[in-house]
Amino acid sequence: MSKNVGSPLSPRRWLRSAGYAWAGVRAVYRSEANFRIEVWAAALALGLTLVLDAPLAPILLTCALVLSLELLNSAVEAVVDLISPDPHPLAKVAKDAAAGAVYVAAFFALLVGLSVLGPRLWALVSG
Ligand SMILES: Nc1ncnc2c1ncn2[C@@H]1O[C@H](COP(=O)(O)OP(=O)(O)OP(=O)(O)O)[C@@H](O)[C@H]1O
């Protein structure tokens, strides 16, 4: 619920909003195993990117996309469970489509990771 606490540029308001957003990230991290796996996969990909001196921007963007979509997927699940605790075809479409968004992003993130890091990893292991 939005409360009017002054200018949108006010640091206090910004900090309060950031606090709510961080609480959301922490709640999803605690409750969703997939999000935990994706966070650690992103940390691994970023670590490899730095160690292998690979381009950072595509890896950062794909990590941000997958993690953000997983957060949105959790938001959709929560809202659907709230408004449709009993099975409903539209609830199914909403949940399946939100999950599909995560899987599409994760699939392309895998391709980006393989194309950016794969050749460098291969060069490293093949001497
Ligand atoms: N209210 C509902 N009405 C119809 N189908 C539903 C409903 N809730 C869940 N489903 C179906 O069951 C599937 C699994 O739903 P669930 O809420 O268990 O999410 P999940 O896939 O376990 O997600 P996560 O593992 O990330 O929590 C959904 O993708 C959907 O197809």
Image (cartoon, helix red, strand yellow):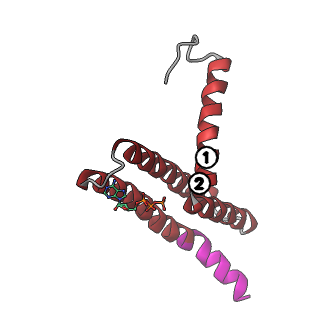
Residue found 49% across the figure and 70% down from its top: 111
- What is the x, y in percent for residue 29? 62, 53
Gap between marks 2 and 1, in whole Å? 6 Å
Residue found 30% across the figure and 55% down from its top: 87
Magenta-span inclusion, residue 93: no
Q: Which residues are magenta?
A: 114-127
Q: Secondary structure at mark 2?
A: helix
**Which quadrant would residue 32 be assigned to in this image?**
bottom right
Crowding near the residue tagged with mark 1, few <14, some 14–19, many ≥20 C-alpha atoms within 10 Å? few
- The picture quadrant for ligand 1 comes to bottom left
Confirm if mark 2 falls within 8 A of ligand 1: yes
Name the residue that disc number 1 marks.
27
Query: In the rendered structure, which amino acid carries the disc numbered 2?
Result: Ser
- What is the x, y in percent for residue 13? 62, 20
Residue furthest to the top in view is 6
Residues at circles 2 and 1 in contact by the CB criterion of under 8 Å = yes
Q: Secondary structure at mark 1?
A: helix
Q: Nearer the viewer, residue 115 or 47?
A: 47
Query: In the rendered structure, which amino acid carries the disc numbered 1?
Result: Ala
The tag on residue 51 is: none
- What is the x, y in percent for residue 31? 59, 54
Q: Nearer the viewer, residue 11 or 116?
A: 11
The tag on residue 31 is: 2
**Which quadrant would residue 18 be assigned to in this image?**
top right
- What is the x, y in percent for residue 124? 72, 81
